[in-house]
Image (spheres, rainbow, N blue to C red):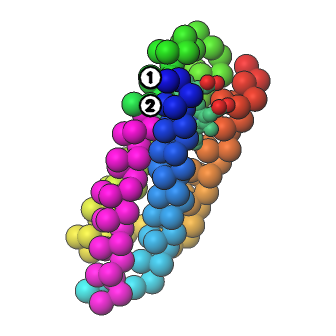
Amino acid sequence: MYEWIKALHVIAVIAWMAGMLYLPRLFVYHCEAEAGSKQSETFKVMERRLLKAIINPAMIVTWLAGLYLVWAGHWLSAGWLHGKLFLVLVLSGVHGFFSRCVKDFSADRNTRSQKFYRIINEVPTALMIVIVILVVVKPI
Ligand code: HEM
C-alpha cells in the first residue's frame, strides 16, 4: 500500500509542478497582450483551466498522499521532513499567490511587470530542486 500511495504522490507532484512551472510562463506572455484583445481572452481561459483542472486538484492529491506517507512511514520526527514541509508550505503560498494573479488577469487589473513574472517563474523550480534532494538524499 505504502509504495502505491508513494507512486500516486509522485504522479500528483509531477502534475502540480508542471502547472506551477507553466502558469507564470503564461503570465509573461499575457503581459504583452492588450487588455480586451482576443489574445488576452485566450490567455485568461488557458490560465483558468490550468489552475482549476490541473494545479488545484494536483496540489490536493499531493498533500493528501504526502500526509498519508508521513503517518504510515512514521516520518514525523525526521529532520528532512521538517525542512521539506517548510518548503512545501512556501510552495503552497506561491500557489495561492498565482491563483490571485489569475484573478487579477481575468479582471484586467494586473499591474505587475513582465520582468516580475520572469523572476517569480524561477521560484517553484528552486523550491522543487531542494525538496527533491531533501526527500531522496535525506541529508538531515
Ligand atoms: C504536500 C506535502 C508533502 C508531504 C507531506 C510529503 C511527504 C512525503 C513522504 C513522507 C514521502 C515518503 C518518503 C520515503 O518513503 O522515503 C514522500 C515521498 C516523495 N515526495 Fe513528498 N511530500 C509532500 C510534497 C512533495 C513535493 C511538493 C514534492 C516535489 C516537488 C515531493 C516529492 C517527493 C518525491 C520525489 C518522493 C519519493 C522519494 C523516494 O521514494 O525516495 N513531495 N513525500
> What type is the residue that disc 1 sits on?
Tyr
Query: Against 46, is 19 above or below?
Result: above
- Residue 61 is inside the magenta segment: yes
Instruction: Please name the residue that numbered disc 1 is placed on.
Output: 68
Report if residue 9 lies within the magenta region.
no
**Which residue is at 37% across, 63% downward?**
50
Q: Residue at x 30, y 57 (%)?
A: 52
Residue 90 seen anywhere in this rendered image of the structure: no
Q: Which residues are magenta?
A: 38-63
CB under 8 Å between discs 2 and 1: yes
What secondary structure is marked by label 2? helix
Q: Is residue 118 left or right of residue 30?
A: right
Residue 119 is marked as none
CA neighbours of label 2 inside 10 A, class few (<14), some (14 to 19), many (20+): many
Q: Which mark is residue 65?
A: 2
Question: Where residue 12 sits in the image (x, y, percent)?
Answer: 47, 44
* Residue 135 as seen in the image, left or right of residue 22: right
Density class for disc 1 (Cα within 10 Å; few <14, some 14-19, many ≥20) is some
